[in-house]
Image (spheres, helix red, strand yellow):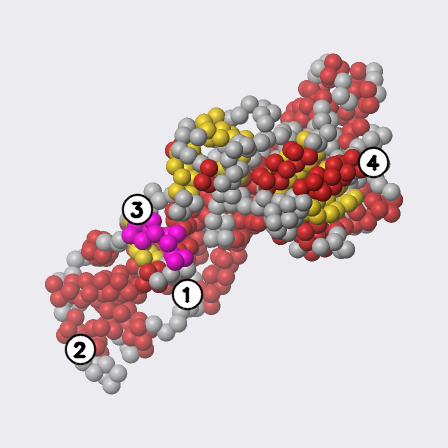
Amino acid sequence: MKELYIHEIANKLGVKDWQVENCAGLFEEGATIPFISRYRKEKTGGLDDAAVAEIKHWIDVFSEMEKRKAGILSTIEEQGKLTPELRSEIENCLVASVLEDIYLPYKPKRRTRATIAKEKGLEPLADKMWNVQVSDPQSEARKYLNDNVPDVEDALAGARDILAERFSESAKIRESMRGIFRTRRIESKASRTAADNPEASKYRTYFNFSMPLQRIPSHNLLAILRAEKEGFLTVGLDTDAEKCGNKIYYDFCQERRYPGPKLAEQVRMAVDDSFKRLLEPSISNEVIKEAKEKADIESIAVFGENLTQLLLSPPVGQKRTMAIDPGFRNGCKIVCLDERGDLLHHEIIFPHPPQSEKVKSIMAVSGMIEEYGIEVIAIGNGTASRETEDFIKRVGIPEGVKVYTVSEDGASIYSASEVARKEFPDEDVTVRGAVSIGRRLMDPLAELVKIDPKSLGVGQYQHDVDQGLLREKLDNTVAICVNSVGVNLNTASSYLLSYVSGIGPALASNIVAFRSSEGGFSSREQLHKVPKLGPKAFEQCAGFLRIHGAANPLDNSAVHPECYHIVDRMAADLGVSTNELVGNDSLIKKIDAARYVEGDFGLPTINDILKELSKPGRDPRQEAQEFSFAEDIHEIDDLKAGMELPGIVTNITAFGAFVDIGIHENGLIHVSQMHGAKLKLHQKVMVTVLNVDLERNRISLRLSSQPRQGSH
């Protein structure tokens, strides 16, 4: 990568040039973000995965810019207009909008008013006016009359068209206009369509809205632009035409000299036309697009943080699980899963109206709990969730069997997906959905990777933001989460394995096939026998794969095989075996990390090894906890201002957090009611009801406190 790009990325991110250069080199060698941040700390200066991902993003941005520059240079060279100065200006440009401004005068364009004027032979007249070489443009214009230019006004109009286009293609003027436009207000008004469409009512806040573009919150801007796209709003900037026109005219005069009154009148007319017809719509679109890009980044960052918290939700682990997809008329779909999440049994019960088969349902649930040794119960949080939770409590479940409410978001998407059909070809969507609910309690990460993150209900305007940026963020987030936890090589699905550093879908399938034929992996070294898993893939993935019960305990740790010899030296120096050293804190505390620094493995790597030896294969996720809603609150009508209730955070946005309080509508804690607290997805909180809007089904909440651990 070119030095100017490396320096620019380092400046943008507040890191050193060498850190960016080393990351770029590692990416070129095929290294992944999780691998670089975990196992190449000496080369990155200890950058975390988020910083490495940012560097990767900007490397990709500037790589695309370099390709764009090559195309621009080729086009200008073909026109015979590429001077050494112009080449240097293009090659050293670092801002996409500036690059396009430089290219604009040379960009092939459709036939315009200016090109028509040039075809009529009016460019020499425009040149003289542009260079202030004529004091009486009317007299000069008479020299250009012909069959296509019948009178002086036609000649002057054509010359003005050429001037207007030049103003609009001036890089200096365009950047000057951007600077002005960025300080203006964005305004939205209801369109004619909005008056007759009930769907428009959700945007009524913006029917007569105005706010400085630099201050508008990201969620407001995205909502306005969505409404404009749907035809309910007209949106624009309150640009000051007079101020902008004066600025353009002043810049024109500063670069030349002030024209006489007759020429000034013509130039002023060209300036006004250029601004109204060419510059204002173009720069308005650019500046609003620029603001949207910033809003996209903020919104995507919120989505990424929410997704991280969701994927790293506490698992209950390998326990025999009953999962219930609740419902009224169509009954409650129940599945029983073994410790590995394999389906043992499924049936439907009807404990709620209209059937109300309560006794029969109680006997069925009790029988399943006993027959399949159920240890935990997962209840989906959709329709009839609260009623089903109340029903389960009346069943008289054995002591020690815990009940959890689980988010159903995305379960229906999964149940109809190709992934689900492959896993359960003989079961219908209701069974698959219930299995997904149970498995996401057992191990949220392993189950949720099968579902498009956009279907998990944790984003803000995810369908309105830049989809390329969103996909990049989501893919990175999933990969970082999967690799931070580590993956059981002998039990992980191919979908989970595909997110492990260096693997991907094809190698994941090969690993599963090899595992099936060989009866599982007993060591990481066996990965070398997997078809098409070469040395580079092994280097990238081995440290993130775990083998429980392996002969070498390091195979069940985050210590990379490339460092096993270092651990063996540590053990030998202490006079014990590696097996005796792993997990033995008293021995590990005796180790002087500095003694084992060698080659590419510096103190950061050695210290990571020591931490891992203390708690090999430790799952960084917390333990799942039970939770119950207020027993006397089931409908929005039950709510009253001042009530204090337990709730679970279901989504976090830039403007607040949505909380499930056990009814069919989530309440909103606005940021102003959070007391500065930073909430997390699925966090259990206590909230106070501030206001209940029955007409719009909206509930305003205030954060009270976090409930005590294990509160029921």
Where residue 35 appears, as percent x and y from the top left, is: 66, 38
Magenta residue check for 203: yes
Residue carrying label 2: 152
Q: Earlier in the sequence, mark 1 or mark 2?
A: 1
Locate residue 690 relative to residue 60 in the image: left or right.
left
- Residue at 20 percent across and 73 percent down: it is 156
Whole-angstrom CA distance, mark 4 to mark 1, is 60 Å
Residue carrying label 1: 107
Whole-angstrom CA distance, mark 1 to mark 3, is 35 Å
- Which one is in front in this view, the residue at disc 2 or the one at disc 4? 4
Residue type (three-letter) at the residue carrying disc 1 = Lys
Residue carrying label 4: 523
Above or below 135: residue 508 = above
Whole-angstrom CA distance, mark 2 to mark 4, is 89 Å
Q: Which quadrant holds residue 595?
A: top right
Task: Give neighbour class at mark 4: few <14, some 14-19, many 20+ (Cα, 10 Å).
Answer: some
Q: Earlier in the sequence, mark 4 or mark 1?
A: 1
